[in-house]
Image (cartoon, rainbow, N blue to C red):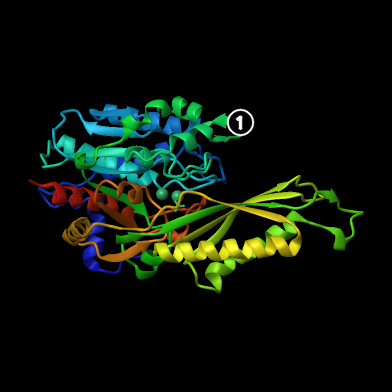
Amino acid sequence: MSIPAERSVRAAEWPLGTRPEGELRVDGARMLRRLAEISRIGARPGHGITRLGLTPEETEARAYLAGECHRDGLVARTDQAGNLVVRRARRRDKPALLLGSHIDTVADGGRLDGTYGVMAACEVLRVLAEHDVELDVEPVVVAFTNEEGAFFPYPFFGSLGLVGQVDTDHAKRMSAHGVALPDALRAAGGDLDTIAEAAWAPGSVAGYLELHIEQGPVLEEASLPIGVVQAITGRTVLDITVCGGQDHAGTTPMRMRRDALAVASRAVLAVERLARSRDLCRVATVGKLDVEPNTTNVIPGLVRLTAELRDGRAERLRTAEQAITTELAQLASATDTTIDVRLDPVTQPVATDHALSRAIADAADELGLRHLGMDSGAGHDAQIVAAIAPIGMIFVPSRNGISHAPQEETDDLHLVAGADTLLRTVLGAGRP
Ligand code: GLV
Ligand code: MN
Ligand code: MN
């Protein structure tokens, strides 16, 4: 994509050579090289990256990152929640300014969602350390684990650990494909029994900044290099189980069937209608569906699916949830099936902090990067960290708006411009 404003082009070209004297800049080439290196972990040709939270691939990525940080003279350790926490070697006894994102992906995901923000944050920390920059906050990088919840369906696990909100009973009971979450966490370097120690006391965190790809089309359509996030969407997930009657596909007359998949199909469309025609929430998706026994000549007896509803307003999410619960109860009684609906913990929408957003906008202005205030339709660790500290988020454009897919991409110039914006925001927000 092209960047229209002449000032923006010059700013975005700084990492390619024109560095105004005396101004700190990230080493864009170094950041991009490391981003390329970490992107090999979990990559499968033609399928993007599968580096699911709390799996060996994510652990390998954490180890790679820790190694690079140690090489830079930084200190990296894994906390009890499986997050990698990176500091400068000489610790200052000051409130922390956390910089971070996640290093896990969805299945067949892209290389930038989460990981870009982590690699950029590490680059910023390295520049601050190299120049021995003294701030009135201590910048600390956190690479969160299992933000996506794609293997263990416990999204935001790492950031929930950081704010002391992991439900340990729930986590103890959770397993996926025969692997228990507590065992996977131990293999990742964490420990569910002592996870409370991963929590940061509220006064110890001055703020949290997250740099992320937009994952949508807004910045690209507006030809703008930087988004300043104003609010992050809320998210409700319902686990739905449709129980019908398994039977012979050749001999059971249509009038006698209780086909769980046919009923689930109606449920899928009812979920879609919540957003598409009823406007009860912004978006509604069924992204997961398991059919039993999933055999060509057998009428499905059981279907498990998830309904994911998102909106920026908590009351709209509640209304949509109630509407679909009522509709599914009616569907069950009309089809002689049972439909069980279980509500997962709701992720509330949150607003970002005005002062941090101002600092981001100022930083972009200083760099000559045009910016736009916008809401995030994706969820982010930032909205969890908001429970203990003010948050700010920076977006860079996503090519064709695509994310959670192998085609996820952002121009290198934008990646570097975003990292420079993060650096300048830290300098602006943390200068004594
Ligand atoms: C996070 O990736 C989300 O699903 O919004
Ligand atoms: Mn994601
Ligand atoms: Mn993400």
Q: Is residue 136 left or right of 358 when viewed as pictured?
A: left
Mark 1, residues whose alpha carbon is within 10 Å: few (<14), some, or many (≥20)? few
Q: Nearer the viewer, residue 199 or 329?
A: 329
Residue 193 drawn at (x, y percent): 41, 26
Residue 213 visible, this orientation:
yes
Residue 34 visible, this orientation:
no
Mark 1 CB within 8 Å of ligand 1: no
Q: Which residue is mark 1?
A: 178
Q: Nearer the viewer, residue 419 or 7?
A: 419
Residue 389 drawn at (x, y percent): 25, 47
Residue 135 drawn at (x, y percent): 11, 42
Q: Residue furthest left?
A: 432
Residue 212 vs 125, above or below: the answer is: below
Q: Residue furthest bottom?
A: 277
Residue type beneath disc 1? Gly
Residue 157 drawn at (x, y percent): 42, 40
Snapshot quadrant of residue 254: bottom right
Could you tell me which secondary element the residue under label 1 belongs to?
A: loop
Q: Residue furthest right?
A: 251
Q: Nearer the viewer, residue 32 or 406?
A: 406
